[in-house]
Amino acid sequence: MPVREAFWSRHPGLAWSNSKADDSVRIRAALMRPRFHRILDIANEFGLDCVQAEWDALLADEDAAVRRAKPIVRRILGNIGKGFAHADSRG
């Protein structure tokens, strides 16, 4: 997956120590510091399935930081999914 520099310029600091980080690393960093509007923006850019896949990868290797983020990310992804489904149903 190629890095989308123009998109990531709207979300500076996700991979501050690695300016060459790929999209996957940046998406995972956003999930570990969950903010609704940032994750929504990422889901609009990459698709909710992509964001969910990155979250699933983090869950597979669950550590203390993932456990802390888990309830927030679960709620955010659930709400984004409901919003996307509602938008799709309105055509």
Image (cartoon, rainbow, N blue to C red):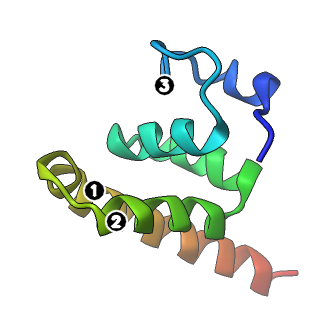
State the separation of the CA atoms marked 2 and 1. 5 Å
Q: Is residue 86 left or right of residue 38?
A: right
Q: Choose the circle earlier in sequence order: 1 or 3.
A: 3
In percent of width and height, residue 17 lies at 45, 13
Please name the residue shown 79% across and 32% down the image. Answer: 4
Residue occupied by mark 1: 72
Local packing at callout 1 (Cα closer than 10 Å; few below 14, some 14-19, many 20+) is some
State the separation of the CA atoms marked 1 and 3. 18 Å
User: Mark 2 touching mark 1, by CB under 8 A?
Assistant: yes
Res 48 → quadrant: bottom right
Q: Is residue 7 left or right of residue 49?
A: right
State the separation of the CA atoms marked 2 and 3. 21 Å
In percent of width and height, residue 41 lies at 64, 44
Q: Amino acid at mark 3?
A: Leu
Which of the labelled discs sits on residue 75, or is there none?
Answer: 2
Q: Choose the circle earlier in sequence order: 2 or 3.
A: 3
Please name the residue shown 53% across and 17% down the image. Answer: 18
Residue 89 vs 78, above or below: the answer is below
State the residue lying farthest toward the bottom: 89
Local packing at callout 2 (Cα closer than 10 Å; few below 14, some 14-19, many 20+) is few
Q: Secondary structure at mark 2?
A: helix
